Amino acid sequence: MKTRQNYFTGKITRRDLLKSTSLAALSSLIYFNLPQPVFARSKEKSRVILIRDKELFNPEGNLNPDVVQQMLDKAVMQLAEANDAEVAWKKFIKPLDIVGIKTNVWNYLPTPKELENAIEQRVKDCGVKPSDISINDRGILNDPVFKRATAFINTRPMRTHDWSGVGTCLKNYIQFCPDPPSLHPDSCADLAKPWFYPNVKGKTRLNILVMFSPMYHNVGPTHYSQKYIWKYNGMIVSADPVAADATGMRIIQAKRKKEFGEDRPINPPPKHIAIADKKYHLGNSEMENIDLVISGWKEELLI
């Protein structure tokens, strides 16, 4: 499977947004304030894998590392359209690669260690030397491995975010910016920019959006409440972070509708996903341009 550089965004489709009056207003905000080329469509579909497992958490509420590894391997196999995990992983990572695993350390909802370990193990299994692998978040600009990396694997949990609407794969690269606050204006509209930096462009092999226990609502930039967390037991994997984010955002929006009993758009609107697609041409954000493969547990799928 050939990976592509046009990887990045996640948004509700225009058709979805126009389903209700409230969503129509959101659609206008996202779309009609963008330049005319915004309505150009990507020609090639992005493959996105959504995998879930009912047994992901044990009875004590802790993650089962074996299930995490199995889910990850199956998703990568489906993405690569391969019948063997080793073959699938080697389509993305080569023995001579230097690999930075971009994680997320937000203390309330960090990338799970079980997933970090699973990714690292498979990178090693591809023949990459341990000294050529690093797992990092806020220190990536000073990390020797990230500085000379030939490949990145991008992973973080899905959650609503007070500045950007949602915190997903696209936003996870804000730490590549020497001045992250410079990307905060206008609801973080230009979060696609770091993906074009010379030390980043074209190096991302996999995007893993963690949907184990996502957060569907928040109040304030650092707000966390167990009330808005639920065990979705899922993982979204794609070479296209835009498409991964679009898929995850649809699930979050569906969860909000279910819990609030009405269409309640994510606030602020996560416009950066549409902009990453339509302005920066980084990937597909419209669901009709996404080849979504769903496997595993189907209960409360929300998509």
Image: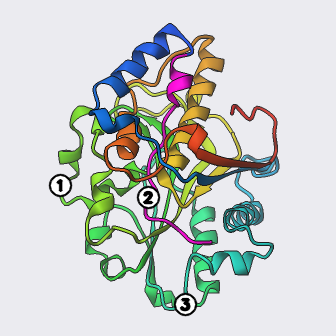
User: For mark 2, what is the residue?
Assistant: 6
**Residue pictured at 62% horizontal, 85% vertical:** 126
Looking at the image, residue 287 sits to the left or right of residue 194; the answer is right
In magenta, the rendered stretch is: 1-18
Query: N-terminal of the two: label 3 or label 1?
Result: 3
What secondary structure is found at the residue carrying circle 3?
A: loop
What kind of residue is marked 2? Asn
Does 212 sit above or below residue 133?
A: above
Q: Is residue 11 magenta?
A: yes
Frontmost residue, 243 versus 249 = 243
What secondary structure is found at the residue carrying circle 1?
A: loop
What kind of residue is marked 1? Asp
User: For mark 3, what is the residue?
Assistant: 95
Give the quarter of the figure containing the C terminus.
top right
x and y percent of residue 240 in the render?
51, 56
Are the residues at dot 3 and dot 1 in contact (C-beta closer than 8 Å)?
no
Give the quarter of the figure containing the N terminus.
bottom right
Label 1 crowding class (10 Å Cα cut-off): few <14, some 14-19, many 20+? few
Query: N-terminal of the two: label 1 or label 2?
Result: 2
Residue 179: in sight, yes or no? yes
Structural distance between the alpha carbons of marks 2 and 3: 24 Å
Query: N-terminal of the two: label 2 or label 3?
Result: 2
Question: What is the magenta segment's predominant secondary structure?
Answer: loop
What kind of residue is marked 3? Pro
Frontmost residue, 229 versus 16 = 16
**Residue pictured at 82% horizontal, 44% vertical:** 297
Structural distance between the alpha carbons of marks 3 and 1: 33 Å
Residue 248: in sight, yes or no? no
x and y percent of residue 98 in the render?
44, 84
x and y percent of residue 70 in the render?
76, 65
**Residue pictured at 41% horizontal, 72% vertical:** 203
The label on residue 179 is 1
